[in-house]
Amino acid sequence: MLYIFDYGGPILVISFSDNQAKIFRKFNDDNIINGMATVAGLLHRVKDTKFFAISRFVGYLGKHFIGVGFVNDIKYRVFIIGFLKRLISEIDSIGVSIIDLIVEKTINHLKREIRIKSVEIIE
């Protein structure tokens, strides 16, 4: 799983299976509140750093966005952090933006770097 947050709450959740990705871009009120709490707790826990690894979660804090990945196999930790850094840096370069542009950039990175064949967007 990959999670993309802005500094207020969740933007995207990406799940993977069988060379496919599902991007969830709309959240109910409980998920938004939990996402906001997650961002607040994360910022408190990893202040003054750009990269972090906490248990099975790794991430990168950009200027406008935060990328977090859940690592199933620890040997992929560095790759996932690198992927998140490149993705978040590109999204940050366009600044605070509309969700469709963030989804487009994310899909491009998934297909280019992870070689995901199919991406489904869940509203």
Image (spheres, rainbow, N blue to C red):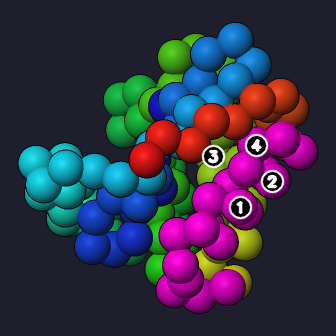
Provide the residue span drawn in magenta. Answer: 94-112
Estimate the spatial distance between the alpha carbons at disc 2 and disc 4, rounded to whole Å.
6 Å
Question: Who comes first in sequence, dot 3 or dot 2?
Answer: 3
What is the CA distance from the residue labelled 4 to the residue labelled 1?
A: 10 Å
Mark 3 secondary-structure assignment: helix
At numbered mark 4, what does the secondary structure look like: helix, strand or loop?
Answer: helix
Residue kind at label 1, given as amino acid type: Glu
- Residue 97 falls inside the magenta stretch: yes
Q: Amino acid at mark 4?
A: Leu
* Spatial CA span between label 4 and label 3: 14 Å
Task: Please give the residue where the numbered disc 2 appears in the rendered image.
Answer: 108
Which amino acid lies under the numbered mark 3 shown in the image of this protein?
A: Ile
**Which numbered mark, 4 or 1, is in the foreground of this view?**
1
**65 relative to 104, above or below:** below
Disc 2 + disc 4, Cβ < 8 Å: yes
Nearer mark to the viewer, of 3 and 1? 1
Residue depicted at x 63% and y 46%? 81
